[in-house]
Structure formats: structure tokens, C-alpha cells
Image: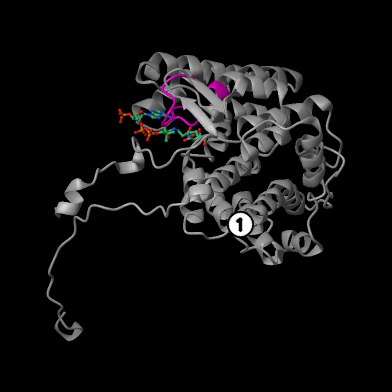
Amino acid sequence: MSAVMQEMQTDIGLVSTVVARSSLSFIDGEKGVLEYVGYDIDDLARNSTFEETTFLLWHQRLPSHSELADFTARVQSNYDLSDAMWDMIVSLPRDANPMHALRTLTSALALEDPNADDPSEEANERKSLAMLAKMPALIAGFDRHRKGLDLVRPDTSSSIAESFLYMLTGEKPTQRMARAMDICLILHADHGFNASTFASLVTISTLSDMYSAVTTAIGTLKGPLHGGANQGVMIMLQEIDGIENAESFIMDKLTRKDKVMGFGHRVYKSVDPRATYLKTFAEGIAQDTGNIDLFNISKRIEEIMDREVGAKGIYPNVDFYSATTYFSLGLDLDLFTPLFAMSRVSGWTAHCLEYLEDNRLIRPRCDYVGPHAKEYVDISQR
Ligand code: SDX
């Protein structure tokens, strides 16, 4: 190993490597604490809105009443898509994976932005707001298209959560449903340097554009070890089918060393505070919508996992109870991860805006373990 490489630290998976400083999310994995810019996630879930939380992440302070009103009005005025984007939605294959569709459509927003490559802070905030405002229509529009339903244009007088549910179902949601969606968006908005956020920073650190950074993040979030886990949890709950099957199902998975979706976390070695909040929340929504059996299976799985692997620090993460919540809100399983993305776009863009304040190209090293000094042999001799 060269002298230079000997000075390097090897940390496969960057498990214990700090790559930057940030003032956005504080996570105490031992105590199970999550704060956005110093505000506890529980306080924000109880008292804030997704719009206010996004303002907090982008500006690192809570807005005044008039600032929030102005911000909300700017977001609402950006909800709708161009005719070309609506046309693109209905041109997509109806059987496409909604995450492929969202990644493609979000990337396409850059094609109609004449200032897509403007690197100024003002332009980056404008692009961030455009993606935040338009992703709900991209997701709901594709879902209506694939079901052969008429497209529903956004309700520019309501919140992101309310307008999304309206575009998805064609009906105004109840206040309880809209608030449930709003809280889910708050809980998923940011989470430090998770894989998709870090991926977006690798892109933005090359001084590429904000659309490219968010496209990178969507592709990264899709993975079942990351944002795709909530869908995996729902599939598992449906496979189990009855609470009496939970014990054998989970024990079989653990015996095979399979990962149980919705459990474990790279940082939390105690319960993910978002899971704690969602558990209480999911029970109420499940009760109201006739899905309490799903919730009870989830509780049983949690008991079994606590008994078998709790001592290893493997607890429910944000995806475990969000699955029952989203299913109870009427979302198709393959819309769970797109919903995660339309929330996390606030965190992805917040971290990109913050990182650009003191940018440093992200370019780690790798420990070369291949051969050296090979003699080239002409193809006629091979
Ligand atoms: C999210 O990073 C973030 O902040 C992400 C996120 C966010 O808000 O952005 O919080 C959102 O992605 C939550 C995580 C969603 N993913 C899942 O639920 C998938 C299932 N979980 C696992 O794949 C796993 O827990 C990870 C990927 C989340 C974390 O894995 P690590 O840190 O790489 O740990 P590991 O895979 O090396 O596991 C350590 C040990 C292993 O056992 P041993 O080999 O040491 O005996 O714990 C076991 C693992 O087998 N283990 C599990 C398990 N997770 C870890 N065993 C069973 N089921 C699990 N879910």
C-alpha cells in the first residue's frame, strides 16, 4: 500500500465517517432523538405544518406569520404543471414503476426551466420550490393516468398534503386525513446524511444543478434498504395475513438471516422517534379506516423482534408504522416511496443549499487491490 494510502482511513459504507458539518438535523442514535434545526420532531409533528417545516429547513429558522403566508402562496402558485408536463405524464407506460416515473418527470422539469443551470442561491431556491410544489402533481397525475382516470389539477387554495390527496382521489380529503398526510410529510422531511441526501450532495458538490441533485436522490431513495422499505413492510404484513402467523413468519426470516423490513437503522440503536410517533398515529388512523388488524400484526411483529434482536439495537424505524398509515390513507403500496420522496425533497434541497455555502467536491479514495504492471498481449496472441 502506498505511503499516501497508508495515511487514509478505510471505512466501508462510511459507517463511522463524518463528511461535513450541518445545522439541519440532529440525530442522537442512542437516545432516539431527532431535531430539525434544534426543534424536536415530536413538537414539530404536533404543532407545525409541512410548509412551515420546509421553511425551517431552508432558512434555518421558523417563519413569521406573514413570511409563512408568503411562502405558502409562492408554493401554491407553483403547484400546477405545464401542459407539456401533463402530456408527458400521460405518455408514460401505465405499468411503469412510480419511482421510475417520478425520477423521469422530476428530471424533465429542468427541460422547461430556462435558468436550470443558474447556480445562484436565488435560482437554487426557486428550483427547490418548484420541485417541492410540483412533485405531488407528478405522483398523483401518474397514478391517475395508470388507472385510466381523468387527471385532477391541483387545488391551489389548499396545503401540499390536502392538494395531493385531492389530486389522487378526485375528492376533497377530510381535515383528519389531510392532517395525517401533513404530519407524515413533516416526519419524513429530513434526516441528516442518509443515503439519498448524501447522494444529492455528491452531485451538487460538482456544481451540477439542483434538478440533477434531486434526480440523483430519487434514484437513491428507491432502494429497499432505504426509502423502499415502507413498501416492503406492507408486502410483509399482507403475506403474514393473520396475527397467528406472525411468529413463524418472522422467526423464519430471522433464521434465514433475512432483513425484516422496517427494522434496524444505521444510526438509531434505540427506537426511531418517528416510529414512536407514527405508532400512536397509525393506530388511530387504522381504527378509523377498518385496518386495525394490520396495526395489531405490526405490534405483534414489534414484540417478536424486540424479544429476538432488541438487544442488538434493532428497533422499528420510520418505515415500519408509516406503512400501515399510508395503507389506511388509501395509498397504493407502490406510492409509499414516491410519497417519501415528495417529503424528503425539502431535506435534500435544504442540504444542497447549505452545502453550497462552503462547497467542497466530494471525492473519496478507494483502496486498490487489483494487479500491477501487467504486460499487454496483442489480441492475436490471446
Ligand atoms: C430509512 O439513514 C437514514 O437516516 C435512513 C432513513 C431516513 O430517514 O432517511 O431513516 C430512512 O432508510 C430507514 C431504514 C429503512 N430500511 C429498512 O427498514 C431495511 C431493513 N433494515 C436493514 O437493511 C438495516 O437495518 C439498515 C440497512 C437500515 C442498516 O443496516 P446497517 O447499519 O448496514 O447494519 P447491518 O446491515 O450491517 O446489520 C447489522 C446486524 C446484522 O447482523 P449480524 O450480521 O451482525 O449478525 O443487524 C442485523 C444484520 O443482519 N440487522 C437486521 C436488520 N437490520 C440489521 N436483522 C434483521 N432485520 C433487520 N431489519
Q: Which residue is mark 1?
A: 211
Q: Is residue 270 magenta?
A: yes
Q: Residue at x 67, y 33 (%)?
A: 53
Q: Amino acid at mark 1?
A: Tyr
Q: Please tell me in which quarter of the rendered image ligand 1 is found.
A: top left
Q: Position of residue 16 (x, y in %)?
A: 33, 35
Q: Which residues are magenta?
A: 260-274
Q: Quadrant of the C terminus?
A: bottom left
User: As drawn, is 2 to the left or to the right of 184?
Assistant: left
Instruction: Please tell me whether residue 175 is drawn above or below residue 116 in the rendered image.
Output: above
Task: Give percent across and percent down for residue 106.
Answer: 65, 55
Residue 355 vertical position relative to residue 119 in the rendered view, above or below:
above
Residue at the outermost bottom position = 380
Residue 44, quarter of picture: top right
In x, y percent, where is residue 72? 79, 40
Q: How is the image coloured?
A: one colour
- Residue drawn at the location 14% of the way across and 52% of the way down: 3
Residue 203, percent from left and from top: 49, 55
Residue 218 visible in rendering: yes
Q: Answer yes or no: is residue 336 visible.
A: no
- Numbered disc 1: secondary structure: helix
Judge the density around disc 1: few (<14), some (14-19), many (≥20) Cα neighbours within 10 Å: many
Please say whether residue 299 is one of the residues in the magenta stretch: no
Residue positioned 60% across, 46% down in the render:
349
The residue depicted at 38 percent of the width and 19 percent of the height is 309
Q: Magenta region, mostly helix, strand or loop? A: loop
Q: On the rendered structure, is 236 left or right of 378?
A: right
